[in-house]
Image (spheres, rainbow, N blue to C red):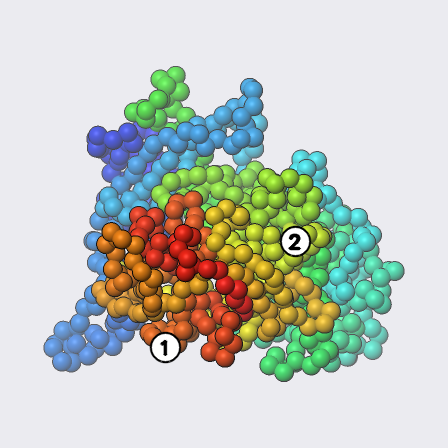
Amino acid sequence: MLCAVCYGVLRGHQGSQWRGTFDLHFDHQSDEAALEKSAATPVSCCICRSILGELSLVEKKRLKPQDNRIKALSGLYKLFGRWVWGKSLQPNTIKTKDRAAFISAYLSELPGLEERSRRVAGAFIPKIYRLDFKLRDSERVGTFVLEQIGDRSSRQLHTPFSTSTSSDEVLEVAKTWINRCTSEEHPECPCEPSEDPEYYPSRLIDLGNMVKILGHKEVRDDPPQIAGNLDKKRREDSKEDSEYIRLVSKDEERQMMRGFYVTLSHCWGGATFAKLTEDKMAEFKRGIHLKDLPKTFENAIRFARRLGQKPGQVRYIWIDSLCIIQAAQPKKPTETEKADWLKESAEMHLIYNNSYCNISATAASDSTKGLFLPREPHLLWEDEINLNTEGIPGYSSSELIQRCKIVDLSFWERHVDDAPVNRRAWVLQERLMAPRVLHFCQDQIAWECRRVDASESFRDGIASFRLRAGEIERAERLKSFVPCGPSNFGNLQGRLATYHHWKAVVERYSKTRLTNPGDKLIALSGIAKLTFGELPDVEYVAGLWSEYLESQLLWRVDPVFEYGKFSFPSSRPPIYRSPSFSWAAIDAERGITYGEFTTENLLIAIEKFDMSQEKDADKFGLVKEGCFIELSGVLKQITLEKRIDQSGIRYCWDLTKSAPEPAGDSRKLGDEYSNVYLDSPQDDTDILGQAGRMYCLPARQDHNGYLICLLLQKDPKQGSQYRRVGLTKIPRYDEVGQKRVYDPQRRQDVPVSIRLV
């Protein structure tokens, strides 16, 4: 639904302003009050709602940390101000009139973004338009894509009416997506599994054999077999066996197991709830009452019972805390608890990959929040507009008015990617490995499979666009990174494509959070196995790969520039979990930039490497101290310094001892190198000054002419042993500076062998 202002701009060009540019410019909302009115019910304009949400983010970015502290204590300041000065102290925040003085709109065409799959003879190729909104003609507060709609007879309009995501209407949407995904319509996706599959996880929760739905009431025709000696009180608490589920073990009951199983992705949060422990194993096998489980588990179980093409086809659900033995004392796990965790975590790729569907509690911040949420169904109705294209370069008078659907570029990010559950590191792996994912979002369900991303607002699929450096481009969907395994390695192009997908996965994974810092490698092990598990010629090197290993060592943590200052929000965990040369040694909330996959212009050479692990450990999982890489390269001793100025903290370095300067070169020894990317300066406090034991290792000249060097710290006890602390880049225009660090013609620049740990 659109408000009168948005409709007037797009259909009637109301508020048009000539700016002498190719795009069309319009005055949009006059002030914040008008914007809020359009975003609120009963109008609920889809465009204005999105802009209003973006404005709140703009305010957060503009407010300095000290402003936030003042704002948090504003009540105290007001009281104190009245007492001292007779008036309240006003915090230095953004004034309303400055925050939303007025909104401007910009409309232009985006040629060349049509999907390749549509570029066939006779196929309809939609025109695509870009619609931007800016605050006071400066700061972007919304970007939309308007995609032309073809023959309406080939499309279906959907009009949700249910007021909760627990409804039968929502269930039917989910079943429709599953039916398409498991049919020939989706050749990329796995077909429906056998009802007597070859693989089951070690343990599952038995939902029962058959369920009938009478309204919202479940009637169990063949409930899980509940032991006759079940505690009397618990039997009296529930009149129906359908309120019980039970734990089953594949080792004990494999011959009787039939039907599909689903999995659940959820946030644990700080909530306490029933978990499988050694002493509760027998009790869970006798039966578990649904009321003893957190709301998210109960909702997922009730929903899973209703899935499938026929009643009872989905017989089981896998939930981590109910199917893996949890430590009774997390800081002191027993040998049994550790062994079970390692065994089950090594099978994560199989557990999720062989499931019927993954149910994701996407919007729930912890297990008490549940799957199902209330909603306003009219906010999900498809948003379309008869767009007036007059004045856009290349417009045709015969197609002056074009019917377009409105796509908010922030929709998927806001509802799915940035939702609470998808900030968890483990869940990224679960999303990738599951054949299909059903997201329970804030006001609707969404869908991911290898062919399409969809939601109730866009049931036939959401166009994959993204905004990058101010430009709109086709985005790669997360499911496009699903590992294809050895079959994709038949040629160099396929091999590099697989490595590119790994790079994209790691960069996204590095932004996620872990409750247990030690899980950094193991929470990604399933994807690693599916990617390269069967390749005999490629070895796993603590998050890197033996092929192209030299260039992969050149990952980096970019400094963050906010509020006019640089910061370095990264850290090293207090425990050892990987060698320093791996990105897995660092926690960086903004993520890392992975190295390239190339053999071009390398200045270092790997001689050998060794990954230290426990006996019989999963080679894609945990490593222990003792991992190393031996390589050769030219090593230069340097001094690293910290500088503090108006832009915050910056780091720079220079050679400690310089080779003789080439004749005619004007660069002096005191000219510092300042393009520095430190891994975790807040933890590596002993790397500064003359006592820092710091060295620079030139590693590669990239395609832009930068000389990329590793920054290493020498071990004070082991003469040839070093650890990585960062990376530095010397630009092409600083030719003298590059030659001072590395010159193959200089006799002193002789490669030496060192060990990185």
SS label for mark 2: loop
Q: Earlier in the sequence, mark 1 or mark 2?
A: 2
Q: Please state if 245 lies on the left or on the right of 471 as rendered.
A: right
The residue beneath circle 2 is 538
Number of other residues with Cα within 10 Å of mark 2, as a class: few under 14, some 14 to 19, many 20 or more: few
Residue name at image x 34 percent, y 57 percent: 740
Residue 29 rendering spot, x and y as whole percentages: 27, 43
- Residue 36 visible in the shown view: no
Residue 671, relative to residue 705: is it above or below?
Answer: below
Front residue of 671 and 662: 662
Three-letter code, disc 2: Val
Q: Residues within 10 Å of mark 1 (few under 14, many from 20)?
A: few
Vertical comparison of 229 with 661: above or below: below
Indicate the quadrant where residue 679 lies.
bottom left
Which residue reaches farthest left? 85
Seen from the viewer's position, the closer of residues 667 and 617 is 667
Q: Can you name the residue that lies furthest to the right here?
A: 255
Residue furthest to the top in view is 398
Is residue 79 depicted above or below 311 in this figure?
Answer: below
For mark 1, what is the residue? 691
- Identify the residue at horizontal 61%, vertical 44% (top origin): 495
From the top left corner, tell me how far across and down residue 64 is, in percent. Answer: 27, 64
User: Could you say whether the residue bearing mark 1 is in a helix, strand or loop?
Assistant: helix
* Residue 527, visible in the rendered structure: yes
Looking at the image, which residue is at 78% across and 72% down?
285
Give the CA distance from mark 1 to mark 2: 39 Å
